[in-house]
Amino acid sequence: MINKAIAFATKAHDGQFRKGTRLPYIFHPMEVGVIVSRMTDDPEIIAAAILHDTVEDCPGVTLDLIREEFGERVASMVYAESEDKTKSWNERKAHTLHALKEETVEGIKLIALGDKLSNVRSLHHDYEYLGEELWERFNMKDKRMQGWYYTGLCESLKSLERFPEYEEFCIMVNHVFADVIAENQIVTEE
């Protein structure tokens, strides 16, 4: 199942690149799969991790196709990790934070952690080289809003704190958004 997911995702993401880079997009879902495989050996969760962006980002890939190829459980996990692009950035991210905080299916949370850890690793790496210019490559260019989202993820995924991946995620969030976090603490204390 995992090999099938790799082949499917590689074909679906063909020609796509990570935002603001020349890095083939498939590296991200593959990294998410590796991260998730360190937390579980469940092949359906790992396959869903690899497929997590296909419905959201790949033309012609539907939830029905994922269900047909990989089954209902994998499709439901991919669906849970997909955002509704008709909503604003703020609405999508607020929904994600709320949904993850309330989520009871650990597999869905593991995929979310794998996805967000991969993203923050990339942010951390690029922030070291680009500094504040990094935020220009995103639709949401406001670092404070990005910081709100990522620090909110630390809270929403807290039930996974027994995993070293969760600790790594929060450490990187605290590093990339240290100035935003400090600014928010000052505002809170006043």
Image (cartoon, helix red, strand yellow):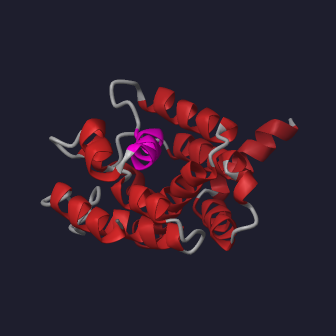
Looking at the image, which residue is at 44% across and 65% down? 32
Residue 7: percent from left, percent from top: 22, 66
Looking at the image, which residue is at 28% across and 49% down? 54
Q: Find out whether residue 76 is within the magenta segment.
A: yes
Q: Main secondary structure of the magenta part?
A: helix
Looking at the image, which residue is at 30% across and 62% down? 5
Residue 134: percent from left, percent from top: 40, 58
Q: Is residue 65 above or below residue 154?
A: above
Quadrant where the image shows the C terminus? top right
Q: Find out whether residue 56 is within the magenta segment.
A: no
In-image side of 114 versus 100 (left or right)? left
Q: Is residue 134 above or below residue 90?
A: below
Looking at the image, which residue is at 54% across and 71% down? 41
Q: Nearer the viewer, residue 150 or 4?
A: 4
Whether residue 184 is visible to the viewer of this picture, yes or no, is yes
Q: Is residue 107 above or below residue 64?
A: below
- Quarter of the figure with residue 75: top left
> From which residue to which does the magenta span run?
72-82
Whether residue 131 is visible to the viewer of this picture, yes or no, is no
- Quarter of the figure with residue 148: top right
In-image side of 161 versus 106 (left or right)? right
Residue 2: percent from left, percent from top: 36, 68
